[in-house]
Image: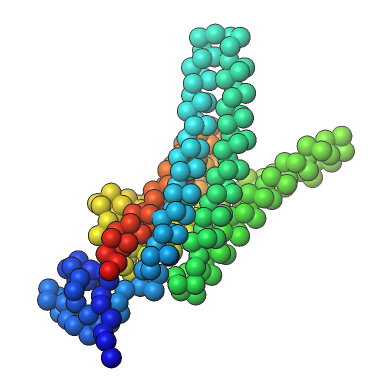
């Protein structure tokens, strides 16, 4: 029986290339018990890398919205007439980029959840994705429903809006916290030696999400800075998957 070659470094960081399952790490003595995580195959890593890009790029693109908003504020303080176009541009950017981010993240997370990741990871990623879509979807449905029934407004919408105001970000941020937790565990499992930025920032980004929820409820200040922090945290978390996949791919035999 041939022994499987180890495809990844040791947990202590020692390079185990050229060693086999059953060998001990010369640095820390750990006996190699597996070639590497099941998801360390060329196909799977390629998919993780592509889906990482699909997820983090639209997150950063969303920053165009606050950038246009700031430009609009600056422009309107200089000229009274030219500001309308600035606000319209900000609104259009939001209407395009926000759904784009929601859809691309859903697709990316769904496509990342391959069986090789393990049953628990797949389940958690899918539940988080579905909860996130449900939260944003119900918010959108509420706004549309309210808009089309504007003549027959009964006042019952106020309670729904307050509930949506409190619940939509809670569910969406909670599901993102779960998603980044699952994805962060890939780095720990592989012990991939990613560049320092990708090792240190994602855990911070994930815990920063906990602070985003109360922040995003604060009128004006929080409405502006909360989503910025949220989308930056997400892009940091998703980008790490790509970095891990890249490092693991280089170590494949
Ligand atoms: Zn070791």
Residue at image coords 50%, 65%:
113
Residue most extreme to the bottom: 1
Indicate whether 22 appears above or below 236: below
Residue 97's spot in the image, x, y percent? 56, 38
Which of the two residues, 205 or 214, is positioned nearer the viewer here?
A: 205
- 178 horizontally vs 21: left or right: right
For the C terminus, give its image quadrant.
bottom left
For the N terminus, give its image quadrant.
bottom left
Residue at image coords 54%, 42%:
217
Residue 247 visible in this rendered orientation of the protein: yes
Which of the two residues, 58 or 233, is positioned nearer the viewer here?
A: 58
- 27 horizontally vs 32: left or right: left
Residue 68's spot in the image, x, y percent? 51, 26
Residue most extreme to the right: 152
Indicate whether 31 appears above or below 68: below
Q: How many marks?
A: 0
The quadrant in which residue 37 appears is bottom left
Residue 161's spot in the image, x, y percent? 69, 44
The quadrant in which residue 131 appears is bottom right
Residue 244 visible in this rendered orientation of the protein: no
The quadrant in which residue 36 appears is bottom left
Indicate whether 31 appears above or below 242: below
- 85 horizontally vs 61: left or right: right
Residue at image coords 72%, 41%:
143
Residue 210's spot in the image, x, y percent? 45, 52
Visual colour scheme: rainbow
Indicate whether 147 appears above or below 173: above
Residue at image coords 47%, 28%:
67
């Amino acid at each position: 029986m041939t022994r499987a070659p180890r495809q990844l470094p040791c947990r202590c960081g020692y390079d185990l290339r050229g060693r086999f399952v059953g060998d001990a790490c010369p640095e820390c003595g750990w006996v190699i018990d597996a070639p590497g995580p099941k998801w360390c195959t060329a196909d799977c890593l390629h998919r993780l890398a592509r889906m990482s890009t699909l997820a983090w790029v639209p997150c950063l693109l969303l920053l165009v919205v606050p950038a246009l908003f700031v430009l609009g504020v600056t422009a309107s303080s200089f000229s009274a007439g030219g500001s309308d176009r600035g606000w319209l541009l900000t609104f259009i950017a939001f209407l395009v980029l926000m759904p784009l981010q929601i859809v691309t993240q859903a697709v990316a997370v769904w496509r990342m959840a391959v069986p090789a990741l393990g049953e628990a990871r797949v389940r958690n990623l899918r539940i988080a994705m579905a909860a996130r879509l449900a939260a944003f979807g119900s918010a959108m449905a509420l706004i549309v429903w309210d808009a089309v029934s504007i003549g027959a407004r009964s006042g019952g919408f106020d309670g729904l809006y307050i509930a949506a105001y409190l619940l939509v970000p809670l569910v969406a941020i909670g599901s993102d916290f779960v998603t980044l937790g699952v994805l962060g565990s890939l780095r720990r499992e592989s012990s991939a030696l990613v560049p320092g930025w990708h090792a240190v920032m994602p855990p911070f980004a994930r815990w920063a999400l906990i602070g985003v929820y109360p922040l995003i409820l604060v009128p004006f200040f929080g409405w502006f800075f909360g989503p910025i922090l949220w989308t930056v945290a997400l892009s940091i978390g998703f980008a790490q998957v790509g970095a891990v996949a890249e490092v693991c791919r280089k170590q494949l035999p």
